Image (tube, rainbow, N blue to C red):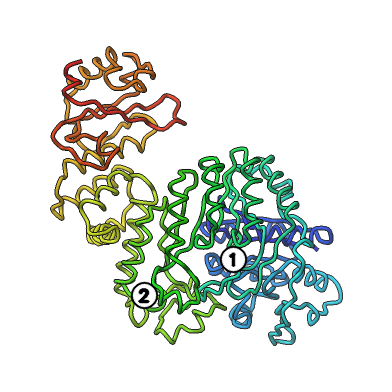
Amino acid sequence: MKIVLSTLNAKFIHTSLAIRYLKAFCGDDFNIDITEYTIKDPAMNIVSDLFQRQPDVIGFSCYIWNIEETITVISMLKKINPQLIIILGGPEVSYDTEYWMERLPQVDYIVMGEGEETFHHLLKEISGDRAFYSVFGTAYRKEGRVLINPPRPKLKLDDIPSPHRFAEDVPSLANRVVYFETSRGCPFSCQFCLSSIEVGVRYFDIDRTKNDILYLIASGAKLIKFVDRTFNIKRDYAMDIFEFLINNHQGCVFQFEITADIMRPEVLEYLAENAPPGVFRFEIGVQSTNDLTNGLVKRRQNFAKLSRTVTMVKESGKIDQHLDLIAGLPEENYHSFRKTFNDVFELGPEELQLGFLKMLRGTGMRADAEKYGYMYMDNAPYEILGNDILPFSDLVRIKRVEDVLEKYWNSHRLDHTVNYLIRQQFPSAFDFFQQFGDYWEAQGWQKIGHQLEDLFTRLRAFLIHRGTQRMDVIEGLMKLDYFLNHKYKPRKIWWEFTLNKAAQNDYLRRLVHNPEAVSTAYAELGIGEKDIHKHVMIEVLPFRLDTYLETGELIADAEQLLIIYFPPDTSTRAMHFTLSLTSAKAM
């Protein structure tokens, strides 16, 4: 019996941990191949590839992001080969299982919940006595009826072989995200999350965990994302892993989901002192700063302690932070969500993810949907369309905030400009993203693509449209940001240079002959007359950029020459220097 395990990932760089667990658990007894696709792949291509593998059984791992595309694939497969046995598993089909069996007659079996032992048992019955009533955790068909067996008890995690030791994975490790699990379960009860359903937290043996990580690093892994729902719930365990990774990372990057308000100060101090810059990333689910809302969804959160953690991590300069928000939680209307957004943005995370409430099957929120007047999509991802206090019209506006936030904050293409605008020109961060998002929509830009320079010209058009003050300063910061987005001299700019060609050449010649006038650091670059035309660009700014960047004070009584150096080694970021125009003319 030939078996294929498959899934449709959201992106090519993603990998499926679930199907690797299944193969690891069953591989000694069954002939199992793994093949992964993406939700963007044409269904015909996926079906053709699977057909050529000639499986007897295909198992699909199903999630909200791939269920509809998976349904298309299995419908085609069953038409081509009615004898093919199709098994579904994963969080999307583990709840309301009878609904899925009724909706999808092409599906023969569904594995519910933790799948390793159940899937193995099911394969044994398919190939043996076919006593499916004995396979706890499975839904199956008998004489036209859907039968759902009782759930299977949790297995001991150390009985599951490692999913990280397949030789066929090694060639692609450096180019894909490796998902890693040190524990299963979550101690919290957030009603919008499937993790709230599982009681208790179980851990894999820590020595096995460390050995798997060492193997992945030695095999070329560059990014390992820990999928533990609360990585830092056990302080000693987390500290042990942090210390181990600090000593053995070899340049690999590790991302963790942490609960920030329970992070102990001594852990933060240890990381601030010992963590190599850029090796750790923290993902922190804030979701809402509204105490009433958090209480209604059974989410215990101390925002003051959370803020302390985020601030300490940020001040260390060692760890990037990704903070999550959810719009549409109970009793969170447009105005209170604006406060939540601003509360969290004020913490200065490197990335702020704005998501929208989804009524996941099996969650308490879905059960309570009517209580709050929720409307939501019938099919995955079950995103809300409004509730009693947050109508669809408000959700649409917040979606515009999300769109511009991604383009202008999370992309880090205009950090100097956006920070200035939020501090100096808009009432709050939310108001900047909202007003710009409304303007973006009104211009129809959401219907067309954009290149890098479009981000700058569209922002400039919006700011001029609203009559923004100090456009000269803003445009100066935009020029700095535009230059810093390039690894080499940009061929195209979106403004006319302040200096004509002859004046530019004159200043460049002065920089060659008197580099010390700029700074010792600039002089040490040793840029000669030949290289300065290849690797340096200059522009005049109407304010003292160096003072502004150092203190935040805007002094606009003297022009400065902005000097950008693009190193020949493009792995090094562009560098910027300033020189007062008076000094430049006197060189």
Q: Amino acid at mark 1?
A: Val
Determine whether 512 is above or below 37 in the image.
above
State the residue position of label 2.
332
Q: Seen from this angle, which residue lies furthest front?
A: 266
Determine whether 495 is above or below 159 in the image.
above
Q: Amino acid at mark 2?
A: Glu
State the residue position of label 1.
73
Disc 1 secondary structure class: helix
Disc 2 secondary structure class: loop
Residue that appears at 76% across and 69% down: 155
**Label whose residue precedes the other's in the sequence (1 or 2):** 1
* Label 1 Cα neighbours within 10 Å, binned few <14 / some 14-19 / many ≥20: many
Q: Is 580 situated left or right of 246 in this image?
A: left
Mark sitting on residue 224? none
Residue that appears at 18% across and 38% down: 555
Q: Residue 115 versus residue 339: which sits nearer the camera? A: 339
Q: Nearer the viewer, mark 1 or mark 2?
A: 2
Q: Is 138 situated left or right of 377 in this image?
A: right
Rendering coords of residue 565 (x, y %)? 34, 26
Rendering coords of residue 338 (x, y %)? 31, 67
Rendering coords of residue 12 (x, y %)? 55, 51
Image quarter where the C terminus lies is: top left
Rendering coords of residue 477 (x, y %)? 25, 40
